[in-house]
Image: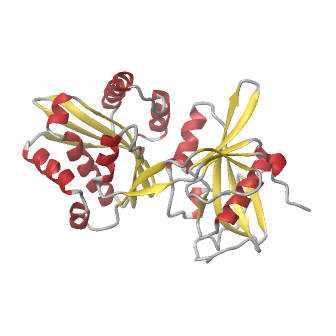
């Protein structure tokens, strides 16, 4: 499990479909997103996420996945303790730099589990199964907005009601500030969000995670704020992990909701992220049963709804190849 220096000359070229006939090997801490040129990079698989967890004292490792000696993907593994027990997590991974089959993805996770047992995974896509894989929770869905079309097409892709609310918010002529966050603005938003969580009965990532993320680079987040008569009426915070960005925290007061401020803030953030070259905005979970209004808001941007794989427990004792 020691680190290994790899040659990455072939990472960025198209490798094509790889099947189980290719020899697979897991190399620990040899390379990751910064080496692999991955086009799809969920927050939980980013180097910035690992760095933030390290500031909180949480250990992570990166499993490089090789097929026939070529790096084709990686998975960041988070270590946790539940009392006397050790548990490892792979969230929204592995990330692939080439096309592979679900069978290849499953085999990669089984090999990882043999080194970091036991392992819980939330794959970025469905279809992972086979020996040793025990589903625990049905697949979640997330809203992913493609930022690569030109701005006019992005606006045309908005749901009609969403776009009408945006127009009304633009006509209200409130002041919008958007840019990298300052500590006072972040503290105010997190305080308001904590009160909102208590009132609505939901939980999000702890405040200390946000502070740990920003401690590495204040420029690794985007803050959008709407004001009326000098008072904040709504705000949003996005975490940046190239080439993706992720919605992180949002709050709106009564006046902000009345003026559709979140539509305006999100639209301005979309334009800003697009201008800076980001390719995807991850708007997070879509839960039509418990939060239908929020789900409609996210889908109304024109975002595609993607199904993640089922949260699964990989039992190492059941992952050994059959003789």
Quarter of the figure with residue 98 = bottom right
Q: Residue at x 75, y 58 (%)?
A: 26
Residue 299, image x and y in percent?
32, 52
In the rendered view, does 206 fall on the left or right side of 251? right
Q: Residue at x 58, y 77 (%)?
A: 14
Quarter of the figure with residue 11 = bottom right
Residue 66, image x and y in percent?
72, 65
Above or below — where is 112 with respect to 73?
Answer: above
**Front in this rendered view, residue 136 or 98:** 136
In the rendered view, does 108 fall on the left or right side of 217? right
**Front in this rendered view, residue 20 or 66:** 20
Would residue 220 be seen by someone viewing this image from the given angle? yes
Above or below — where is 93 with respect to 186?
Answer: below
Above or below — where is 106 with respect to 264?
Answer: below
Toward the right, the furthest residue is 323
Quadrant in which the C terminus is drawn: bottom right
Residue 221, image x and y in percent?
39, 43
Residue 146, image x and y in percent?
37, 61
Q: How is the image coloured?
A: secondary structure
Quarter of the figure with residue 186 = top left
């Amino acid at each position: 499990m020691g680190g290994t220096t790899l040659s990455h000359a072939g990472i960025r070229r198209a490798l094509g479909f790889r099947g189980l006939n290719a020899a697979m090997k897991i190399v620990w801490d040899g390379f990751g997103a910064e080496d692999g040129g991955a086009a799809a990079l969920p927050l939980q698989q980013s180097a910035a996420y690992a760095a933030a967890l390290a500031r909180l004292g949480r250990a992570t490792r990166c499993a490089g996945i090789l097929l026939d000696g070529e790096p084709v993907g990686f998975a960041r593994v988070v270590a946790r303790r539940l009392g006397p027990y050790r548990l490892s997590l792979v969230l929204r991974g592995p990330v692939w730099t080439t096309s592979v089959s679900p069978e290849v993805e499953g085999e990669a996770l089984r090999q990882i589990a043999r080194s970091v047992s036991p392992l819980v995974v939330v794959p970025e896509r469905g279809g992972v199964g086979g020996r040793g894989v025990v589903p625990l929770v049905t697949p979640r869905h997330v809203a992913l907005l493609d930022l690569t079309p030109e701005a006019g097409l992005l606006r045309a892709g908005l749901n009609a009601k969403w776009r009408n609310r945006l127009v009304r918010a633009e006509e209200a002529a409130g002041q919008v500030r958007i840019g990298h966050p300052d500590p006072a603005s972040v503290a105010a938003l997190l305080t308001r969000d904590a009160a909102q969580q208590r009132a609505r009965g939901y939980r999000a990532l702890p405040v200390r995670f946000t502070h740990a993320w920003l401690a590495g680079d204040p420029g690794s987040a985007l803050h959008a704020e709407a004001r009326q008569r000098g008072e904040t009426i709504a705000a949003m915070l996005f975490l940046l992990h190239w080439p993706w960005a992720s919605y992180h925290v949002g709050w709106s007061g009564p006046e902000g909701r009345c003026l559709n401020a979140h539509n305006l803030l999100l639209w301005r953030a979309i334009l800003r992220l697009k201008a800076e070259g980001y390719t995807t905005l991850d708007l997070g979970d879509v839960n039509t049963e418990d939060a239908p209004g929020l789900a409609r808001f996210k889908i109304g941007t024109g975002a595609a709804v993607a199904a993640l794989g089922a949260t699964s427990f990989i039992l190492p004792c059941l992952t050994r190849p059959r003789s």
